[in-house]
Image (spheres, rainbow, N blue to C red):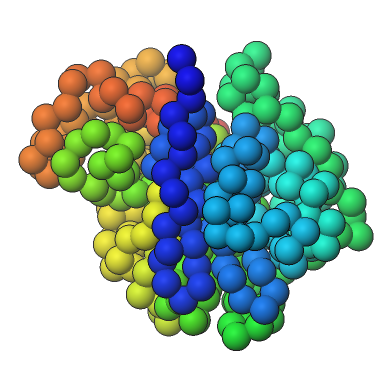
Amino acid sequence: MAQQAPPAPVDLGHGVWMIDLMEQGMPYRTAGYLILDEKITLVETGSAKSHDALLAGMAAVGVKPEDLAYVIVTHVHLDHAGGAGHLMAKATNATLVAHPRAGRHMIDPSRLWQGAYSVYGDKLADLFGSILPVPAERVLIRNHGETLDIGSRMLTFFDSPGHAKHHFTILDPVADALYAGDALGIRYRTGFTGWDKEWVWPSTSPVDFDPEAIHRTAAMLAEAPFSIVYHGHFGPSPKDEAIRDTVRAADAFAEIARDVVARGGGLTQLVDALRAWMQQDLARMGLSPDPSLGPLQMDLLLDSMGLLHYAQQLQKG
């Protein structure tokens, strides 16, 4: 069966284009954001499996890899940054911008690959492709509060843990937006689920989920001057909705995990408990999906794995 063609890039205004990276061949799942300014900048590359979709999306708006000045990855999970090395090999004029905890994994991705293998096992390469290193001299670290001048706008970086310790978010004052990666949840789009409502839940995939850090990050970002969240998964949300619903569901997920582990349960029991909560929350929104939750099954499993690690570590003290 031929792979579905990616949707056309979406003009979000203010020189920002959203490119569907077709993660796992699925539209409306993972996005990259191309900023057309004096120094053309890309936020998120997706995995190596997204490389062709990324290049096609860039070409559709008239940008070649060598036109890029900066490539920014919000964090180093493979669905966001696994393809960075492949792009940087072609984007010969670009500098890769990374979180202080992330840069070393872009330079030497061996530990990143090992960590991902512990989650995905032998399916890893099939899911995400390979990883290529980025030369150290082409990696720029941005600490909390530091900026990057790309022309008409000065991007500001915020250390934003909760989903991952190696995560920052990027404020774009011209677009009145925050490139949030996974720090303010996943927006489940109708184009992805096939359902007639959209909503935001957190991503709690292994291994850094921390609900207290999510609260701190959310409180910090609530004070930042922007109106729109650009999610890595997928597209824009109003700021208040993204913050409110990420925190609300993160607290619920954490409580479920603590309860299951306190009762001696493991991954199977946690998957069942989280699925039940998700079904109830979807019903609250007026949705009645198949009990298997269809397109949410992978997230259900990965979220449960991250929650199990969180609760077990908490129990160990």
Q: Residue at x 65, y 14 (%)?
A: 122
Is 21 in front, or is 167? 21
For this view, does 95 lie left or right of residue 14? Answer: right
For this view, does 28 lie left or right of residue 183? Answer: left
**Residue 123: x percent and y percent?**
61, 17
Q: Is residue 119 above or below residue 75?
A: above
**Residue 246: x percent and y percent?**
34, 53
For this view, does 190 lie left or right of residue 226? Answer: left
For this view, does 136 lie left or right of residue 14? Answer: right
Q: Quarter-wise, where is residue 269 in the image?
A: top left
Q: Residue at x 67, y 35 (%)?
A: 48
Q: Residue at x 28, y 55 (%)?
A: 245
Q: Quarter-wise, where is residue 152 in the image?
A: bottom right
Is 296 in front, or is 211? 296
Q: How many marks?
A: 0
**Residue 185: x percent and y percent?**
40, 51
